[in-house]
Image: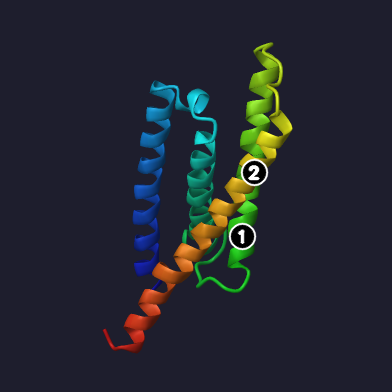
Amino acid sequence: MINVLQERILKLLFILIWMLALIHMTAEYYHLYWTIRWFDILTHFLGGLWVGIAVVWLWYFSGYVRKMYMPDRHTVFVALLGGLLVGLIWELYEYIVWILTDAGLPPGYVGDTLLDLVMDVTGAGVGFLILQQFVFKKPVEAQAQGE
């Protein structure tokens, strides 16, 4: 059953990262981050979604962090903490870029950063909910029905 879950999660991660990459490249090309004020909210949410699912895969299914086993009641915290941690690292990167380019911090920087982190964690939480509803349930239901 774990191999089936692994495959589903990896397919979902593949689709999500390509969606995120295409949206980001389009936003960069058409300057959408600068012309549509809220556009980065979308990419932070999708990035958090991807990170939340990726962290759950890494922690529970990859075998890299620990022996593979089914997710437990702590899974939501693994996803949320992963989203927060990666979001903090990204915001630190952005801060360093702003400082090193002598551009100074833009107006509303703190509020924007907090909203970005909220969207990262929200995306990770939704990623957990997607896994719980559509990935983790299917093998259990299929096994119960004798498929």
Residue drawn 53% across and 70% down?
71
In the rendered structure, find residue 53 and report the number of the disc placed on it: none
Of labels 2 and 1, the one closer to you = 2
- Residue tagged 2: 117
Q: How is the image coloured?
A: rainbow
Residue 28 in picture, x, y percent from top left: 43, 24
Q: Badge 2: how crowded within 10 Å, few (<14), some, or many (20+)?
A: many
Residue drawn 71% across and 36% down?
111
| Residue contact between numbered discs 2 and 1, judged by CB atoms under 8 Å | no
Residue 103 in picture, x, y percent from top left: 67, 13
Residue drawn 32% across and 81% down?
142
Residue drawn 49% across and 41% down?
42
Q: Mark 1 belongs to which amino acid?
A: Val
38 relative to 32, above or below: below
Mark 2 or mark 1: name the one nearer the start of the chain.
Answer: 1
Measured in 3D between alpha carbons, the distance from the residue under mark 2 to the one under mark 1, in whole angstroms, is 16 Å
Dot 1: what SS? helix
Q: Mark 2 belongs to which amino acid?
A: Leu
Q: Badge 1: how crowded within 10 Å, few (<14), some, or many (20+)?
A: many
Query: Does residue 56 appear in the picture of this structure?
Result: no
- 57 left or right, relative to 83: left
For the residue pair 43 and 70, the one nearer the viewer reads as: 43
On the rendered image, what quadrant is the C terminus found in?
Answer: bottom left
- Residue tagged 1: 78
**Total numbered badges shown on the rendered structure:** 2
Residue 6 in picture, x, y percent from top left: 39, 63
